[in-house]
């Protein structure tokens, strides 16, 4: 619309001038909307361009760009680590006073006083010492010839593997899993101490004969999922056999488990949640899952009416789908995928896992199962990462973040002292914050998207015991990230399993207040080791009320 010249304006009547002003105002509003849409597109292109530059840098082997700074919402609302009441950092007392109860030896140091001196007692000082000595023990095993002609050979002490004692194995496992020391450095360290060992033998000691630990790790996961009121989940990239994969973390404040696979699909996550139980089960829970995922009614009825309800393995389940003709249906959603996910969910519920458990995640699609809750830190991070192009957009983002921070602080206060009346007020306040029209198109779309997830973001108002974030999972999975950066990927199934099991048991021990070093000493049969109860029992006891 071209503006009229001055001469023409002089000839217009008052009503015509009003119409002209209205038309111009509408044109300005239209152009402003077009401008904001273009700015949103430019911001999206900027993000895409940065992602492409990062990918080019990765392919060229260049160092990655520094990560964006965290928003700081959790720390600003009194949730930072190492902080006490009022957000003040707690002071740690110096000194190891508990060592007075752990004295293992006492040495009297003699003085040379001059003649005529009087004895005034002792001045004590506690000295912490560690001795690493290489020992080569010769075991002379008695051999006897029985009357039947059979040779009887004396058994070696428990824990000896391939000519190496349990104390050495414990040192290797603790240093590699907890200390993140590579096999090359472990080999060099042992050589310096005086133990001749090859890197290949070190790898064998780190991965072989861990059957008891593998079983206990599986039982820890089962005990945790059977008694957890909530779990937080996360995943990270992992390399195995020169292929890209993913490590999934599952845990709460009592246990942690890691599982590495080639896919991060919902089917793979459900398989992990089975906690080692095989098979596929068509139960009411499975059928409800299928209906909730919009599987066609005739397909659900076909599965429900068939007499076969339990299938031992994937081959049997696939054959069943083929017999019913479900694998030949070309419809959306994929009936094979939904039916398989439902059968896995049926297996989980049949074995008593996840009984009303809330799964708290960062909104990755594969984690949206059962009673699901969203992490507030990740939700706020979406607003924090918006890039404003004008001062108005910057002010709109800052105001929105401020409102979210205040709301988050009040949610944390409500969680400490739940109140139904205040819960209703918080729900209404949530609506006001996330239905605001800020004038920033991208921000408004994001707020509308978060408002659609209201039930998951406010799950804490129904279950006050659940956390508001997944910081626990991110802290746990950082060990896997560090291991990946230091040691790279794995090649053998035994090494991948050993990595997941040892990291999971280490994190579980830490949450239960058990020394990982002493735990391995008991499990590897180190002479004189302190007995440690089974970790699954400790997980269940931690869940039981006092």
Image (cartoon, helix red, strand yellow):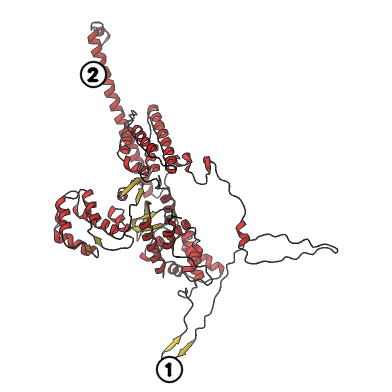
Residue 264, horizontal then vertical, whole percent: 31, 53
* Looking at the image, residue 323 lies above or below residue 82: below
- Give the image quarter of residue 150: bottom left
Q: Which residue is mark 1?
A: 147
First-in-chain label (2 vs 1): 2
Q: Mark on residue 1?
A: 2
SS for callout 1: loop
Mark yes or no: residue 448 visible.
yes
Q: Mark on residue 166?
A: none
* Looking at the image, residue 376 lies above or below residue 38: below
Mark yes or no: residue 69 visible.
no
Nearest the viewer among 10 and 101 is 101
Q: Residue furthest right?
A: 116
Residue 108, horizontal then vertical, whole percent: 71, 66
Residue 45, horizontal then vertical, whole percent: 32, 37
**Label 2 crowd bin: few (<14), some (14–19), many (20+), radius 10 Å:** few
- Along the horizontal axis of the image, is 240 left or right of 178? left
Quadrant, the N terminus: top left
Q: Residue furthest bottom?
A: 147
**Label 1 crowd bin: few (<14), some (14–19), many (20+), radius 10 Å:** few
């Amino acid at each position: 619309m071209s503006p009229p010249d001055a001469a023409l304006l002089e000839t217009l009547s008052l009503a015509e001038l009003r119409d002209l002003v209205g038309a111009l105002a509408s044109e300005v509003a239209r152009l402003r909307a077009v401008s904001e849409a273009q700015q949103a597109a430019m911001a999206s292109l900027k993000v895409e361009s940065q992602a492409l530059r990062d990918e080019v840098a990765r392919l060229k082997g260049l160092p990655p760009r520094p990560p964006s700074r965290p928003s700081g919402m959790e720390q600003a609302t009194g949730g930072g680590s190492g902080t006490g009441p009022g957000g003040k950092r707690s002071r740690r007392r110096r000194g190891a006073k508990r060592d007075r109860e752990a004295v293992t030896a006492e040495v009297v140091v003699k003085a040379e006083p001059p003649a005529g001196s009087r004895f005034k007692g002792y001045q004590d000082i506690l000295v912490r010492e560690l001795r690493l000595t290489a020992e080569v023990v010769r075991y002379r095993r008695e051999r006897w010839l029985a009357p039947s002609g059979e040779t009887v050979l004396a058994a070696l002490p428990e824990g000896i593997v391939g000519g190496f004692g349990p104390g050495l194995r414990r040192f290797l496992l603790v240093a590699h899993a907890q200390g993140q020391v590579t096999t090359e450095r472990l080999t060099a360290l042992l050589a310096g101490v005086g133990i001749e060992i090859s890197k290949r033998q070190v790898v064998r000691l780190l991965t072989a004969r861990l059957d008891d630990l593998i079983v206990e790790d599986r039982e820890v996961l089962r005990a945790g999922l059977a008694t957890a009121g909530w779990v937080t989940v996360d995943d990270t990239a992992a390399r195995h056999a020169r292929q890209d994969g993913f490590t999934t973390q599952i845990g709460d404040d009592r246990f942690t488990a890691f599982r590495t696979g080639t896919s991060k699909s919902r089917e793979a996550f459900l398989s992990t949640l089975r906690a080692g139980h095989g098979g596929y089960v068509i139960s009411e829970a499975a059928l409800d899952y299928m209906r909730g995922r919009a599987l066609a009614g005739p397909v659900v009825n076909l599965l429900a009416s068939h007499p076969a309800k339990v299938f031992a393995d994937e081959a049997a389940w696939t054959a069943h789908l083929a017999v019913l003709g479900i694998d030949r249906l070309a419809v959306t959603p994929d009936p094979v995928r939904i039916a398989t996910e439902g059968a896995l969910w049926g297996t989980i519920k049949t074995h008593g896992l996840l009984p009303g458990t809330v799964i708290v995640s960062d909104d990755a699609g594969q984690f949206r199962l059962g009673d699901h809750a969203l992490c507030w830190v990740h939700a706020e991070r979406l607003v924090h990462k918006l890039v404003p192009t004008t001062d108005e957009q910057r002010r709109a983002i800052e105001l929105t973040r401020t409102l979210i921070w205040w709301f988050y602080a009040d949610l944390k206060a409500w969680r400490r002292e739940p109140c139904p009346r205040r819960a209703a007020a918080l729900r209404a306040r949530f609506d006001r914050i996330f239905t605001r029209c800020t004038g920033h198109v991208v921000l408004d779309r994001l707020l509308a998207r978060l408002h659609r997830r209201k039930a998951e973001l406010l799950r804490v108002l129904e279950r006050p015991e659940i956390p508001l974030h997944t910081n626990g999972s991110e802290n746990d999975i950082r060990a896997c990230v560090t291991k990946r950066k230091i040691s790279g990927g794995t090649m053998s199934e035994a090494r991948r399993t050993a990595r997941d099991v040892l990291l999971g048991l280490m994190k579980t021990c830490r949450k239960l207040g058990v020394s990982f070093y002493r735990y391995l000493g008991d499990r590897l049969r180190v002479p004189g080791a302190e007995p440690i109860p089974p970790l699954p029992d400790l997980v269940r006891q931690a869940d039981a009320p006092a």
